[in-house]
């Protein structure tokens, strides 16, 4: 696609519109009086003098460093100022700029090919397909991305072939290898944290809250160990607790050093069994 040509050679004029023969062009860092270099060619191998002396036609070859800001001061041959223009920036082309000199904000870029270089920041607004070699999967669907990464779908991870006995999740060993204790020295109401635990109690008894108060999941299971020399009660509030293997329901008594396990089998129904439980 063709584009308009940039000005191939700069020409300057006096107040009457005549070519400024022998005029002077000073170039500074934008907003300062610090001299900033320009060049005679795009290769940036030969710097201009500063000031630049214009030829008989008021012309000069002035190439700016891409991405930098300049201030121009123009004088005639008698060193009388004609004008000053600040914040002159050479955008250049992407191929002439490096990563530290390019800032792209907003807008849409299309049909851009980037070769080499590196980027800092994030890619929250990147759309399209990014090749795996460039940090993406080169895929447009989750299934294709998993294939590219060699990953399994959720719930079907074949990469895990074994788990060490010492592996823990949330501080507890994986699997049914032990029953962590919840030691209580006073009356205790069963809570979510008691799931899969043994309530070691010495006094005050244990109460299972009504489903309307705390809707524990069906299958919720906990144990009670009476770590005392006297009986302890395991009570139920408005719901039903059945003694396993019988038609008996309601609060149960756990003898000294007795052990019992309770499991929720329906929204408002529990079953309990154990040694020393009546």
Image (cartoon, helix red, strand yellow):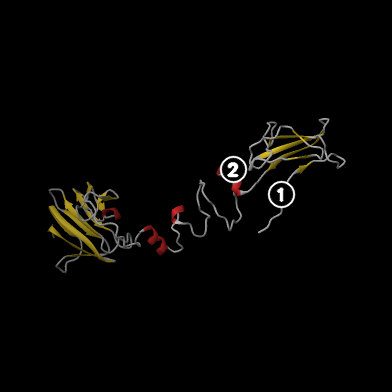
The residue under the point 52% across, 55% down is 126
Viewer-proximal residue, 29 or 160? 29
The residue under the point 43% across, 58% down is 137
According to the image, label 2 marks what residue? Answer: 101
Q: Is residue 57 left or right of residue 257?
A: right
User: Splitting the image into 4 quarters, where does residue 176 fall?
Assistant: bottom left
SS for callout 1? loop
Nearest to the eye among marks 2 and 1: give it.
1
The residue under the point 70% across, 41% down is 88
The residue under the point 59% across, 43% down is 101
Residue 162 - label:
none
User: Splitting the image into 4 quarters, where does residue 73 fall?
Assistant: top right
Q: Is residue 107 left or right of residue 205?
A: right
According to the image, label 1 marks what residue? Answer: 6
Q: Quadrant of the N terminus?
A: bottom right
Viewer-proximal residue, 145 or 5? 5
Viewer-proximal residue, 99 or 275? 99
Percent of width and height locating residue 211:
30, 63
Which sits earlier in the primary sequence, circle 2 or circle 1? 1
Percent of width and height locating residue 19:
83, 40
């Amino acid at each position: 696609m063709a584009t308009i040509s940039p000005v191939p050679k700069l020409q300057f004029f006096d107040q009457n519109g005549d070519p400024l023969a022998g005029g002077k062009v000073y170039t500074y860092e934008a907003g300062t009086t610090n001299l900033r270099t320009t060049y005679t060619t795009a290769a940036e191998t030969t710097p201009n003098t500063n000031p630049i002396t214009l030829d008989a036609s008021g012309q000069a070859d002035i190439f700016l460093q891409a991405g930098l800001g300049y201030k121009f001061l123009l004088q005639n041959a008698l060193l009388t100022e004609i004008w000053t223009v600040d914040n002159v920036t050479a955008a250049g082309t992407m191929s002439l700029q490096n990563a530290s000199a390019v800032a792209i904000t907003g807008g849409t870029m299309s049909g851009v090919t980037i070769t080499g270089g590196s980027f800092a920041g994030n890619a929250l607004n990147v759309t399209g397909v990014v090749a795996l070699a460039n940090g993406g999967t080169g895929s447009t669907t989750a299934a294709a991305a998993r294939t590219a990464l060699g990953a399994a779908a959720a719930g079907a991870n074949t990469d895990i072939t074994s788990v060490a006995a010492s592996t823990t999740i949330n501080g507890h060993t994986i699997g049914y290898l032990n029953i962590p204790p919840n030691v209580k020295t006073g009356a205790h109401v069963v809570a979510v944290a008691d799931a899969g635990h043994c309530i070691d109690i010495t006094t005050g008894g244990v109460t299972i809250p009504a489903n309307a108060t705390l809707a524990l999941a069906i299958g919720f299971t906990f144990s009670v160990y009476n770590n005392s020399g006297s009986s302890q009660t395991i009570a139920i509030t408005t719901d039903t607790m059945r003694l396993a293997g019988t038609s008996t329901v309601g609060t149960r008594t756990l003898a000294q050093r007795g052990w019992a396990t309770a499991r929720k089998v329906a929204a408002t129904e529990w079953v309990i069994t154990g040694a020393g439980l009546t």
